[in-house]
């Protein structure tokens, strides 16, 4: 049987009313969620007997609730889960008391056991003692075994009995870290990790604030400077609280971290001096936050939530991928130029890249489920599991994803069309768009003009046209002043690159000029 995973343990006293049937139902619910019952007390018994009124139909259960999430607020999170589970079971129950069981690990010094057979009672010259000490530090006399604790504890542990064998006497220990020098300086393991994370976070804030301040003006610049000052003060405080015993060296290390991040942000170490940009900071922070939030959300999912969230999400992405394979962006781009999607000869690789671009437009919408992951990790009441899947929330997220992707796709294609039209009006080379590379072309008919077939306005051989390539048997052209494209069979014309969009084309002696 797979052992359930959890981060925190909370001891809760739950009063269940209603008699034996309700008690049995509550016990089944506790067992189904993997919450062991450490005991129960009837009326007038237990640690809460003096605080509760005596009720013959009530029983107080001592339940150990195991849950994911942060240590801070886990008692509230456990109480919310218990209330929702009992409400779903239609059991009258009250969480009378909840207290976290703190089981953070103490950071002990580690020691390596080594043999002392190389020592002799008569002693050694000073130079040989120095060599032997260096050899011990390099692990020359190490034997199998690592112990942890204070120096005296480590030595006793190293010389303790080993699996029925006699206790070895010719062994000693050497430290593998420096924690043994002052065992009271360090916080417990998880608390130290939290304080270290806060130190790095606050050290990054001044660097980011100064980057924003360098590009701001007026009042906004002073606001960012104040944010930077706040970050420096919080970094100094976090450095002073990194260990139980504050030292000036810890504060100096925190300030050095601020200077290092600020120099990186302002481009001091960059040969070009560019450094970070506000856009890079916002995008990086968003991506890191989304990934972290989704990780916190996914690791807490039950099988029911996997089915409720993942299956519809995969189906939605599969459908959108299928639609994107038809090049939605190319279709919108063609429509903006009064063309049809079939008029653009787009290589398959660019169609795939356009589909990937469309799917990337969904990424920012994932901020909402990422926030849900952080809310669960921080034990927010509205995000506590137990109510089942909220179909209204899912439909809202789905519509938001589709709406956001549609708006971004329209804006992307519209911006590309505007750049192409503006370049055409100026006679400049227009930019490409996912494999569509319009180019100025001189078109010379090889038949008489009145015998040209196709669609659109009449062809003017002296005017350069934007060519979008050959689609099927037709050449797709777009003129500077034309309101609709020109489509002419490729077998009736001859095309060559034009010098620019403003230089007229040399017609020469052709059948079209003899008419």
Image (cartoon, grey):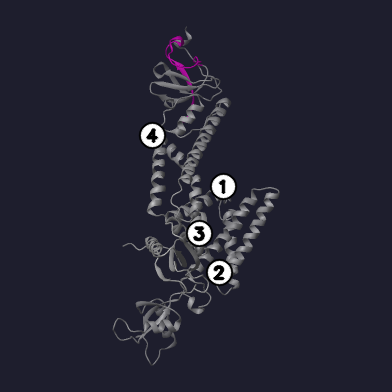
- Residue 47: percent from left, percent from top: 48, 74
Q: Which mark lies nearer to you, 2 or 3?
A: 3
User: Which residue has dot 2 on it?
Assistant: 242
Query: Around disc 3, counting alpha carbons within 10 Å, would you say few (fewer than 14), some (14 to 19), or many (20 or more)?
Result: many
Q: Which mark lies nearer to you, 3 or 4?
A: 3
Task: State the CA–CA distance, disc 4 to disc 1.
Answer: 31 Å
Q: Is residue 124 left or right of residue 248?
A: left
Residue at (56%, 20%) from the top-left corner?
Answer: 481
* Vertical placement of residue 386 versus 176, above or below: above
Q: Which mark lies nearer to you, 1 or 2?
A: 2
- Are dots 4 and 1 in contact, CB under 8 Å? no
Query: Quick one: label 1 or label 2, which is nearer the N terminus?
Result: 2
Residue at the farthest left position: 164
Q: Which mark is residue 379?
A: 3
Q: Which mark lies nearer to you, 3 or 1?
A: 3
Q: Which mark lies nearer to you, 2 or 4?
A: 2
Q: Which mark is residue 279?
A: 1
- Are dots 2 and 3 in contact, CB under 8 Å? no
Q: Is residue 247 left or right of residue 136?
A: right
Query: Quick one: label 4 or label 1, which is nearer the N terminus?
Result: 1
Task: State the CA–CA distance, disc 2 to disc 3.
Answer: 25 Å
Residue at disc 4, secondary structure: helix
Question: What is the quadrant of residue 127 in the picture?
Answer: bottom left
* Vertical placement of residue 512 versus 2, above or below: above
The magenta-colored residue range is 436-461
User: Which residue has dot 4 on it?
Assistant: 348
- Residue 144: percent from left, percent from top: 33, 77
């Amino acid at each position: 049987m797979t052992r359930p995973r959890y981060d925190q343990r909370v001891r809760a006293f739950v009063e269940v009313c209603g008699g034996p049937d309700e008690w049995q139902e509550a016990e089944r619910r506790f067992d189904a969620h993997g919450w062991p019952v450490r005991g129960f007390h009837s009326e007038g018994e237990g640690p809460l007997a003096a605080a509760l009124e005596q009720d013959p139909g009530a029983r107080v259960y001592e339940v150990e609730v195991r849950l994911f999430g942060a240590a801070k607020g886990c008692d509230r999170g456990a109480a919310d889960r218990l209330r929702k589970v009992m409400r779903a079971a239609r059991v009258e129950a009250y969480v009378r008391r909840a207290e976290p069981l703190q089981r953070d690990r103490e950071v002990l010094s580690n020691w390596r056991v080594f043999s002392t057979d190389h020592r002799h009672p008569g002693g050694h010259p000073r130079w040989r003692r120095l060599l032997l000490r260096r050899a011990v530090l390099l692990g020359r006399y190490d034997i199998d075994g690592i112990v942890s604790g204070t120096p005296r504890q480590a030595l006793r542990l190293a010389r303790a009995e080993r699996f029925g064998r006699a206790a070895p006497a010719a062994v000693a220990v050497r430290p593998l870290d420096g924690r043994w020098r002052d065992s009271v300086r360090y916080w417990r393991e998880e608390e130290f990790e939290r304080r270290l994370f806060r130190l790095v976070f606050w050290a990054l804030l001044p660097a980011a604030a100064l980057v924003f301040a360098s590009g701001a003006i007026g009042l906004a610049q002073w606001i960012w400077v104040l944010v930077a000052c706040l970050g420096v003060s919080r970094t100094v405080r976090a450095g002073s609280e990194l260990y139980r015993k504050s030292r000036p060296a810890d504060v100096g290390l925190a300030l050095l971290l601020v200077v290092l991040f600020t120099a990186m942000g302002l481009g001091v170490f960059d040969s070009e001096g560019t450094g970070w940009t506000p856009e890079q900071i916002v995008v990086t922070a968003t991506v890191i936050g989304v990934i972290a939030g989704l990780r916190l959300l996914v690791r807490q999912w039950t099988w029911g939530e996997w089915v409720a969230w993942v299956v519809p999400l995969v189906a939605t992405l599969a459908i959108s991928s299928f639609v994107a394979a038809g090049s939605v962006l190319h279709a919108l781009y063609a429509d903006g130029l009064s063309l049809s999607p079939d008029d653009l000869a787009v290589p398959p690789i660019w169609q795939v890249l356009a589909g990937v671009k469309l799917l990337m437009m969904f990424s920012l919408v994932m901020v909402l489920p990422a926030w849900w992951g952080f809310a669960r990790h921080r034990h927010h009441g509205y995000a506590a599991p137990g109510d089942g899947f909220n179909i209204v929330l899912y439909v809202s997220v789905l519509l938001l994803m589709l709406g956001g992707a549609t708006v971004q796709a329209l804006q992307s294609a519209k911006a590309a069309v505007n750049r192409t039209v503006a370049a055409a009006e100026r006679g400049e080379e227009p930019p490409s768009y996912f494999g569509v590379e319009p180019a100025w072309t001189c078109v010379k008919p090889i038949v008489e003009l009145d015998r040209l077939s196709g669609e659109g306005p009449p062809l003017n051989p002296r005017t350069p046209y934007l060519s979008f390539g050959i689609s099927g048997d037709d050449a797709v052209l777009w003129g500077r002043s034309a309101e609709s494209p020109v489509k002419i069979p490729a077998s009736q014309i001859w095309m060559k690159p034009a010098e620019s969009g403003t230089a007229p084309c040399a017609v020469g002696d052709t059948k079209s000029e003899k008419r």
